[in-house]
Image (tube, helix red, strand yellow):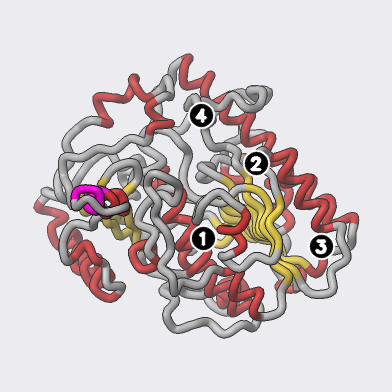
Amino acid sequence: MNLVMIDCHDLGQHLACYGVESVSSDHLDALAADGVRFSNSFCTSPQCSPSRAALYTGRYPHSNGMFGLAHFPFSWHLHDDETYLAEYLKDAGYETTHVGVQHVTEFNAEAVKALGFDHVLAGNLAPEVASSAIGFLERHHEHPFFLNIGFFEPHRDHTGGYRLTPPDSAKGVNLPPYVPDTDQSRLEFSELQGMIKSMDEGVGRILETLDRLNLTGDTWVIFTTDHGLAMPRAKCTMYDPGLKTALIMRAPQLGLTGGHVIEQLISHVDMTPTILEVLGIEVPKKLEGKSYLGLLKGETDQHRDSLYFEKTYHTDYEPQRAIRNARYKLIWNAEVDITNVPADIMHSAIYPQMIDILTQSRPAFELYDLEADPNEMMNLADDAAYLAIKDDLRQQLVTWMRDTADPLLEGPVASPYYERAMHLLRGENA
């Protein structure tokens, strides 16, 4: 069975099949209707490189080494002994190809090949990424293949806007509850919808090619994203809009058809062990994710009681850890007065409208009742009625950190920039 795994930047669950009716996502909606959609899929980290590293290694960012962004000047990287999904599949006899955008290593073909890919094909924006992927699919394949496709959209452009594609407001504009309903918000979300539409059309071209080449019946298609929308109080935050992710699968051979919705809590760190188990490849004991093959096969309705999240660096040091179950979330802010808003979001016209909320000092703990307060606006950490719940979640969080050898338990985590700066201070070459 072939594997086509598609990811994109900064999408969250902002698709029509997830209830955002103004988004033109016809092809992904059709994939969900024909396959399986996960309503409670979450990333491990609300930021690009750490989230993707967990997705493709099956290990949490603080375990695999990806504490922050991979590109210069941040320069985080996987530990030398980490194994990327492509390497597992290559060793099992798969032809492995990456097309388009990735954000787990440097932006060059040799670095991407080192992750375990036989071929690396060019592409950035959706039309060219789709064309490169189609070109690969049209080749003769003597072995099952793993085609990993990365779309840039709907990441903001270098100006911090969404102006790489025409805006799309043909179906109106639905705003999430965490942004103000203003003309600026509506304009920016119409531009965001245009980026999503372009990405969706690229996905559609790839799916149509699988049909045309009679590959659909023997191909497992997975679509997901790294984290939430690049909006204030979403991307780079521990709130659900930063952590919830679209996850859609279709695999006729596995029975992943018919528009079924899986509602159990799922973590990106579970993806690699699930893929390996489904494909009959040994799952290494070092993986920290938990396969949900039983859910896919309908053999169980149990998976995880709780999910764990982390952030250490983005463009600045901002260590946070969190735990979430079906009803409650506890966030630990290890540096309580730091609020790091990504630079691309700072360029948004929405950012200054929310600056009073975004620059508030944060306490060490935040506790939210997600049933009563789904927008996570009322911190219950100091409410006497919730102290037992808070303490139980705190103990579970500490246990997870200990079990996964989180270095934050031992003290602040130094960055690669710090290491280079120390070499320079000593008069050494960085």
Q: Residue furthest top?
A: 183
Direction from residue 322 to residue 84 in the image, left or right: right
Sort mark 1 into few (<14), some (14-19) or many (20+) by Cα contacts within 10 Å: few
Mark 3 secondary-structure assignment:
helix
Tag 2: amino acid:
Asn
Q: CA distance from mark 3 to mark 2?
A: 25 Å
Q: Which mark is residue 100?
A: none
Residue placed under numbered mark 4 in the picture = 158
* Residue drawn at x 19%, y 61% as measured from the top left: 389
Q: Within 10 angstroms of label 3, few (less than 14), some, or many (20 or more) residues?
A: some
Residue depth check, mark 1 versus mark 3: number of the one nearer the observer = 3
Q: Nearer the viewer, residue 273 or 88?
A: 88
Gap between marks 4 and 1, in whole Å? Answer: 36 Å
Question: Residue at (74%, 38%) from the top-left corner?
Answer: 127
- Residue 263: which numbered mark, if any? 1
Residue in the foreground of this view, choosing between 421 and 37: 421
- Residue at image position (49%, 29%) is 175
Q: Earlier in the sequence, mark 1 or mark 3?
A: 3
SS at mark 1? loop
> Pointer 3: what residue?
216
Relative to 94, residue 151 above or below: above
Q: Nearer the viewer, mark 3 or mark 2?
A: 2
Asked if the magenta segment contains residue 249, the reply would be no
Secondary structure beneath dot 2 equals loop
Instruction: Find disc 2 in the rendering and name its residue.
Output: 124
